[in-house]
Amino acid sequence: MAAARLLVELDVKPDLAEAFVEMFKAEFIARSRSEDGCEQYELWQSAEAPGKMTIVEVWSSKNHLDAHLAQDWFGEWAPKMEAMQATPLVVRMMTSAED
């Protein structure tokens, strides 16, 4: 079964970029990385524009990704994330050109 890959592009309000990174690290990264099937889960931040961020996710399968997205804590966390965004996030489902 092919891995499921996501790139999630975020435009966080510039004055909240540092707080967003700290919240994301404390509340989201550890949880996601501990889930079954998580191969990679990282938050990347633009060196030129700290409010521009990308979440890079690789899951062992689409089923693992679906289980991740079905977690109850998303309902609690999503409003916090949305309140810090300057624009709606962009989610891109990716496949490897090498697969």
Image (cartoon, rainbow, N blue to C red):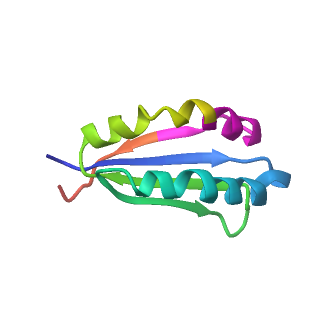
Q: Residue furthest left?
A: 1
Looking at the image, is 3 positioned above or below residue 66? below
Looking at the image, is 27 positioned above or below residue 62? below
Q: Dividing the image into 4 quarters, which one contains the C terminus?
A: bottom left
The stretch in magenta equals: 77-91
> Residue at point 34% right, 36% down?
67
Q: Is residue 86 magenta?
A: yes
- Residue 69 is situated, as x and y percent measured from the top left of the image, at 42, 35
> Residue at point 63% right, 57% down?
26
Q: Is residue 63 left or right of residue 48?
A: left
- Residue 35 is situated, as x and y percent measured from the top left of the image, at 37, 50
Q: Is residue 80 left or right of residue 14?
A: left
Looking at the image, is 7 positioned above or below residue 83? below
- Residue 51 is situated, as x and y percent measured from the top left of the image, at 73, 55
- Residue 41 is situated, as x and y percent measured from the top left of the image, at 44, 58
Q: Is residue 5 left or right of residue 75?
A: left
Q: Residue furthest right?
A: 15
